[in-house]
């Protein structure tokens, strides 16, 4: 297959972009179909550039025309691909790359989802805390809620993709894993809504609209929000542990990485013991956060390994199509 | 997009009409960019047809038998120092479809000599 532009017309930035887009949207198609379309585009780019250059147009004008033609055609390109293959469309991205990308995304999403408000419900004098929080500008409150909602939605979508990518490996574990992250996403939505309620109550307190009961009510909502965030965090952790189990069983990552997840689980369990038995909140917080940090570290290392590592090497089970397991 | 049997999309009418113009001008076969330019000139459009729109329509019309295409001989392309062209022809079916869509657009049988019968 000729993939280089021949002849007198040099391929500029716009031409390279248009051709790169054609390579992208034809990825995974049958070789004949793909070659046919790439030849059409390659020839068109060449003829267009040559024709316009010979007509006296400047390279920048030709580049602009090319860019504009390719951009206007993107919807038709996507529709064409979808109409050819419909729901059977195969993009053929190795499953490791997909899962690895999700793991790295989860690091960011979980951190957003579990750092929702900045409210200190343990602080002595909730009234003062509420007054301080009422000074947050509205755009900041709205921005926080939007950010949280986006994180919740993303968690749900990633849970679905994870399930789809891993169900062939382990139906039960991938169901549990997908459920954990999806539930964490739903709880993030709930926490975002509770955050909005507390922010509104804080505003009402500062303007003198609320009575004495508003302090109790707002604190109740803030405490509920804290617990919802905590439950979401625990669900995310359980999802990570299940993911670590799948990755260990399927040899998606070096098996010794499981040690990180085991240590993380041990610390989280120890934090629970400290809370129940010793009743030392400071110790509990420190131990729990160490466990959570190790879980995050597992996500980063495992995600990076899957994204950058050798897919053929990391796949187990002796699949013949190991190098390009379609999602 | 679904079409009613026997009807053409506007872009298909434009392609067939421009293809007929090219045949009249002596180009029995034409490549994708040539048809985009012919459409632009014929319809006095400021912009050329987008890549995606053009090639999606050309593939669809070929599947429907309105056009045929061949890949240019590699030696010819090499001699001219350019990528190989996909060369299209309006078929008799395509000609009839154009006449049906625009009765005044082309005299019946005007292309019979140059067009590839379907």
Image (tube, grey):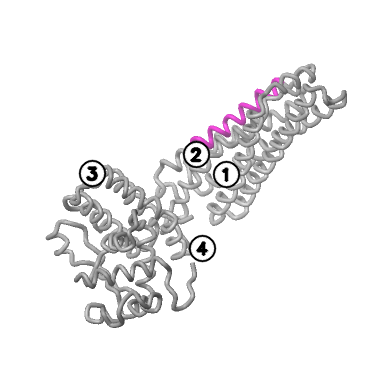
In this picture, is A253 found above or below A210? below
- For disc 4, the neighbor class at 10 Å (few under 14, some 14 to 19, many from 20) is few
N-terminal of the pair, mark 1 or mark 3, is 3
Q: Are marks 2 and 4 on the same chain?
A: yes
The magenta region covers A282-301
N-terminal of the pair, mark 3 or mark 2, is 3
Mark in front: 4 vs 3: 3
Residue shown at 17% from the left, 52% from the top = A7
N-terminal of the pair, mark 4 or mark 3, is 3
In this picture, is B39 found above or below A203? below
Q: Main secondary structure of the magenta part?
A: helix
In this picture, is B85 found above or below A256? below
Mark in front: 1 vs 4: 4
Residue A101 image point, x, y percent:
49, 43
Q: Are marks 1 and 4 on the same chain?
A: yes
Left/right placement of residue A188 relative to residue A95 reads right
- Residue carrying label 2: A302
Mark 1 → mark 3, Cα distance in angstroms:
55 Å
Q: Are marks 3 and 2 on the same chain?
A: yes
Q: Circle 1 sits in a helix, a strand or a loop, which is it?
A: helix
Residue shown at 38% from the left, 63% from the top = B56
**Tag of residue A58:** 3
- Residue carrying label 4: A87
Contact between marks 1 and 4 (CB within 8 A): the answer is no
Outermost residue, right direction? A212
Mark 2 → mark 4, Cα distance in angstroms:
30 Å
Q: Are marks 4 and 3 on the same chain?
A: yes
**Tag of residue A243:** 1
């Amino acid at each position: 297959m000729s993939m280089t532009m021949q002849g007198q017309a040099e391929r500029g930035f716009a031409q390279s972009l248009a051709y790169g887009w054609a390579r992208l949207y034809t990825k995974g198609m049958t070789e004949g179909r793909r070659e046919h379309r790439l030849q059409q585009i390659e020839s068109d780019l060449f003829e267009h550039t040559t024709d316009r250059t010979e007509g006296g147009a400047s390279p920048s004008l030709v580049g602009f025309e090319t860019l504009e033609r390719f951009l206007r055609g993107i919807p038709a390109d996507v529709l064409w691909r979808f109409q050819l293959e419909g729901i059977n469309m195969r993009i053929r991205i190795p499953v490791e790359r997909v899962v690895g990308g999700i793991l790295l995304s989860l690091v960011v999403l979980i951190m957003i989802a579990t750092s929702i408000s900045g409210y200190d419900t343990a602080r002595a004098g909730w009234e003062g805390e509420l007054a301080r929080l009422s000074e947050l500008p509205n755009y900041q409150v709205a921005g926080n809620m939007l950010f949280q909602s986006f994180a919740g939605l993303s968690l749900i979508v990633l849970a679905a993709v994870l399930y789809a990518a891993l169900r062939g490996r382990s139906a039960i574990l991938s169901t549990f894993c997908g459920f954990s992250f999806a539930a964490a996403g739903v709880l993030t939505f709930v926490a975002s809504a509770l955050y909005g309620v507390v922010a509104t109550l804080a505003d009402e307190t500062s303007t003198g609209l609320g009575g004495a009961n508003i302090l109790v009510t707002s604190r109740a909502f803030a405490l509920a929000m804290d617990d919802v965030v905590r439950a979401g965090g625990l669900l995310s952790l359980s999802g990570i542990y299940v993911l670590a189990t799948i990755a260990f069983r399927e040899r998606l990552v070096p098996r010794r990485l499981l040690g990180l997840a085991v240590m993380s689980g041990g610390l989280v369990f120890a934090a629970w013991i400290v809370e129940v038995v010793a009743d030392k909140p400071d110790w509990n917080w420190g131990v729990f956060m160490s466990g959570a940090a190790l879980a995050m570290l597992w996500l980063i290392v495992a995600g990076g390994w899957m994204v950058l590592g050798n897919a053929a090497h990391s796949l187990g089970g002796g699949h013949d199509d190991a190098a390009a397991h379609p999602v | 997009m679904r079409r009613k049997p026997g009807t053409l999309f506007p872009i298909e009418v434009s392609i067939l009409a421009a293809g007929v113009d090219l045949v009249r001008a002596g180009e029995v076969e034409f490549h994708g960019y040539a048809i985009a330019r012919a459409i632009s000139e014929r319809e006095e459009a400021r912009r050329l047809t987008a890549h995606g729109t053009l090639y999606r329509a050309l593939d669809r019309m070929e599947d429907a038998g309105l056009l045929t295409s061949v890949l240019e001989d590699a030696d010819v392309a090499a001699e001219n120092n350019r990528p190989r062209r996909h060369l299209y022809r309006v078929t008799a079916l395509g000609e009839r479809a154009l006449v049906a869509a625009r009765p005044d657009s082309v005299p019946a049988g005007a292309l019979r000599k140059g067009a590839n019968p379907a």
